Image (cartoon, rainbow, N blue to C red):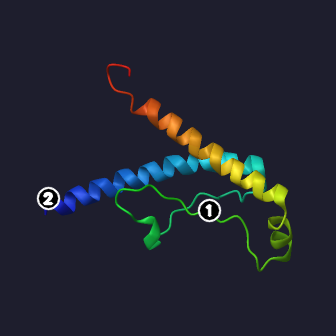
Amino acid sequence: MVTSILIDLAQRETKNNAAKFAQVLVPELQRAGDVTQKSHKFAGFRVLKAPDVPSVLIEVGYVSNRSDESVMGTTRWRRGMTSAISRAIDRYFKESRVDHKPADGR
């Protein structure tokens, strides 16, 4: 029973961290290109349920959509998206360090 409670607490914290990352990621993606209005959603995909690793699923387009496929095929678009994701990751970890700074300020 204790193990179950501890796993639940870890999963809850991990889900909260994933949501915090998504809040950082979405604005970066919006700067790089078109993003749907309600772009941050929760899903029960097994790969997103690790108890100890915050995770997000980034869906940037559909290869079955000719317009999306055409844009995704350009170097400029790919660089823009990868740069946006990279900036979001850097910003997330920078902000996480500030949030988890020890009491002694180190």
Q: What element carries label 2?
A: helix
Residue at image position (32%, 19%) is 104
Q: How crowded is mark 2: few (under 14 residues within 10 Å), some or many (20 or more)?
A: few
Q: Which residue is situated farthest in the top direction here? A: 104
State which quarter of the image contains the C terminus: top left
Q: How far apart are marks 1 and 2 (CA)?
A: 34 Å
Residue 100: x and y in percent read 39, 33
| N-terminal-most mark, 1 or 2 | 2
Q: Does residue 98 appear to the left or right of 4 in the view shown?
A: right
Of marks 1 and 2, the one in the foreground: 1
Q: Is mark 1 on a helix, strand or loop?
A: loop
Residue 64: x and y in percent read 77, 80
Q: Can residue 44 be seen in this view?
A: no
Above or below, 84 against 44 in this view is above
Residue at image position (77%, 51%) is 80
Q: Residues within 10 Å of mark 1 (few under 14, many from 20)?
A: few
> Does the CB distance between marks 1 and 2 fall below 8 Å?
no
Residue 31: x and y in percent read 76, 46
Q: Residue 2 carries which label?
A: 2
**What's the residue type where badge 1 is placed?**
Ile
How many marks the image carries: the answer is 2
Q: Quadrant of residue 62?
A: bottom right
* Location of mark 1 (residue): 58
Q: Can residue 49 be seen in this view?
A: yes
Residue at image position (80%, 66%) is 72
Q: Quadrant of residue 57?
A: bottom right
Between 18 and 86, the one nearer to me in the picture: 86
Residue 78: x and y in percent read 77, 58
State which quarter of the image contains the N terminus: bottom left
Q: Which residue is situated farthest in the left direction here? A: 1
**What's the residue type where badge 2 is placed?**
Val
